[in-house]
Image (cartoon, rainbow, N blue to C red):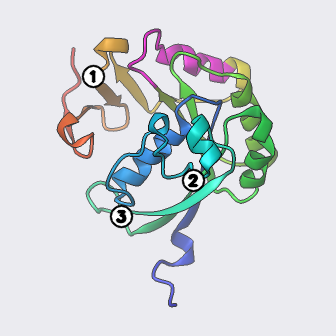
Amino acid sequence: MARTTPISLYRNIGISAHIDAGKTTTTERILFYTGVSHKIGEVHDGAATMDWMEQEQERGITITSAATTAFWSGMSQQYQQHRINVIDTPGHVDFTIEVERSMRVLDGAVMVYCAVGGVQPQSETVWRQANKYGVPRIAFVNKMDRTGANFLRVVEQIKTRLGGNVVALQLPIGAEDNFTGIVDLVKMKAINWNEADQGMTFTYEDIPA
């Protein structure tokens, strides 16, 4: 079969985190927003696309690394289409070797952190593994709507506990029950998602005072 996407436009992206930080849930959103799936699979329902093993569905945890492919050209189709190979890795310490195997082939990693729990033991482990294999990474602070969520605390923990030289690209608008969106510090605009279509569309607005 002829290759439809040039190899230069392939990217292998890993999703890594401490258990229950929302790693597989984040992956499910990526699949939904890129059109791979037409329904968001929830881990607590045992319906996550990436948790295919019966044991994973029963326990609500990821045991093996799972890979899938998505295609992305930007929200406005402004870029040449890229093929994104997404690898969802386990967050439980017992399956750390699965994460290390994945790190060897990654072009980049998304490190998912719970806005409440922050940097946790397995967060430190996967960070060291990424350092070992020279994997560039971006941090995603998840669960900003949870009680006790604190974005800036997590950023500080990444600096002090992981030694990361981090720069915030976005800031949350509110937290916990008052979390309503984010501020894009590159565009200097507020982003608000449309809840009616599960965040498939969003608007850029002036930053609230």
Residue 126 lies within the magenta run: no
Residue placed under numbered mark 2 in the picture = 52
Q: Earlier in the sequence, mark 2 or mark 3?
A: 2
Q: Secondary structure at mark 2?
A: loop
Q: Residue flagged by tag 1: what amino acid is it?
A: Thr
Residue placed under numbered mark 3 in the picture = 79
> Which corner quadrant of the image does residue 17 belong to?
top right
User: Can you say whether 2 is above or below 36 in the image?
Assistant: below
Q: CA distance from mark 1 to mark 2?
A: 33 Å
Label placed on residue 18: none
Q: Nearer the viewer, residue 74 or 66?
A: 66
* Left or right: 19 as drawn, with respect to 6: right
- Residue shown at 26%/57% (left/top)? 76
Q: Earlier in the sequence, mark 1 or mark 2?
A: 2
Q: Nearer the viewer, residue 188 or 33?
A: 33
Q: Secondary structure at mark 1?
A: loop
Q: Residue flagged by tag 3: what amino acid is it?
A: Tyr
Examine the rendering and report whether any part of residue 177 can be seen.
yes
> Which corner quadrant of the image does residue 156 belong to?
top right
Examine the rendering and report whether any part of residue 15 can be seen.
no
Q: Point out residue 12 in the picture as x, y percentages from the top left corner.
A: 60, 60
- Residue shown at 49%/38% (left/top)? 43
Label placed on residue 180: 1
Q: CA distance from mark 2 to mark 3?
A: 32 Å
| Residues rendered magenta in the picture | 143-159
Question: Which numbered mark, 2 or 3, is in the foreground of this view?
Answer: 2
Q: CA distance from mark 3 to mark 1?
A: 28 Å
Outermost top residue: 148
